[in-house]
Amino acid sequence: MNFALALFLLLVATGAVWLADRWWLRARRAPGRPEPWWVEYPKSFFPVILVVFLLRSFLVEPFKIPSGSMLPTLLVGDFILVNKFTYGIRLPIVNVKVLEVNSPRRGEVMVFRFPENPSLDYIKRVVGVPGDLVEYRDKRLTVNGVEAKVRPDGQYQYVENGLSFVSAMMQLETLGEHEHRTLIQPDAPGVHLSGVKQFPLRENCAYNDAGFRCRVPPAQYFLMGDNRDSSSDSRYWGFVPEANIVGRAFMIWWNFDDLRRIGTFID
């Protein structure tokens, strides 16, 4: 059971006790008799759960970064906030959009439900929106025939999976209105062909040893990790349906290992 559903069921249970006491149980209690614990506790928790549920469903939701696929933008252990309304107001649990606000734009960092397992939340950067022609060849990203501007930004070292030391080239890439850092390992292929799956709408893509080319279908998005050579993303498991969108990541609110990251906005 996912957390949103569990929170909703808890809200319904405590709300039912609150309503029952307001309209029926209170009148049946003798004057001066205290509330039984099974009424007192749910009534106390109900307003708190209601506020949390509304905030989490319609305004902001916290997430923790579990992997290094978005290095150097996001570190393992970063706690981030996700704007839940910037891409439209959605009903909680069923995730059905009821009010259109904005659509994801190239360069934005988006949280979404993993297409292969919607119970998992993933975070990547939007590189292609519906109708775009996305190409990635020889480590260079091109969208609709226009190559993304990049410039070198030094070296970046990190430990992967707690075992192997990785040294990568860092570069500043401009995508849409966003300039962000990406990591490249020069000796790694742009895409590991053996890892490409037979995902839905796979016919929109063509792969070879140099990279790939994909036409993004309607109501779908193409996303990639900033750690380009160490990211499981749309190159391997395909497009992200519009219905799977959770929200836009916008701020790091906590990191136990590096307090300087607190309050950093995500670009």
Image: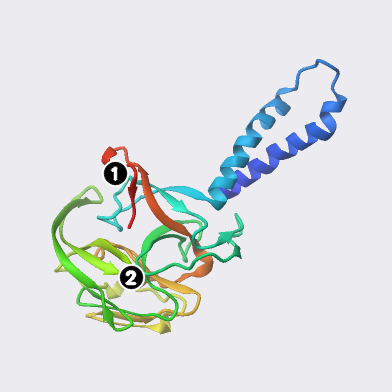
Q: Name the residue: 74% across, 35% down.
A: 17
Q: Nearer the viewer, residue 55 or 19?
A: 55
Secondary element under disc 2, as helix, strand or loop, is loop
- The amino acid pointed to by label 2 is Gly
Tell me which label, 2 or 1, sits earlier in the chain.
2
Secondary element under disc 1, as helix, strand or loop, is helix
Quadrant location of the C terminus in the rendered image:
bottom left
Q: What is the residue that sits farthest to the top in this orientation?
A: 32
Q: Is residue 43 left or right of residue 116?
A: right
Residue 26 placed where, x, y %?
A: 82, 27
Q: Which residue is mark 2?
A: 176
Position above or below: 237 against 205: above
Position above or below: 176 against 66: below
Residue 67 placed where, x, y %?
A: 32, 53
Q: Name the residue: 60% across, 49% down.
A: 5
Position above or below: 187 against 61: below
Q: How many C-alpha atoms fall within 10 Å of the one at disc 2: few (<14), some, or many (≥20)?
A: some
Q: Is residue 1 visible?
A: no
Q: CA distance from mark 2 to mark 1?
A: 25 Å
Q: Name the residue: 60% across, 64% down.
A: 99
Residue 174 placed where, x, y %?
A: 26, 68
Q: Nearer the viewer, residue 240 or 89?
A: 89
Q: Would you identify the image quadrant in which residue 207 lies?
A: bottom left
Q: Which residue is mark 1?
A: 261
Query: Cβ–Cβ below 8 Å for labels 2 and 1?
Result: no
Q: Would you identify the image quadrant in which residue 97 lies?
A: bottom right
- The amino acid pointed to by label 1 is Arg
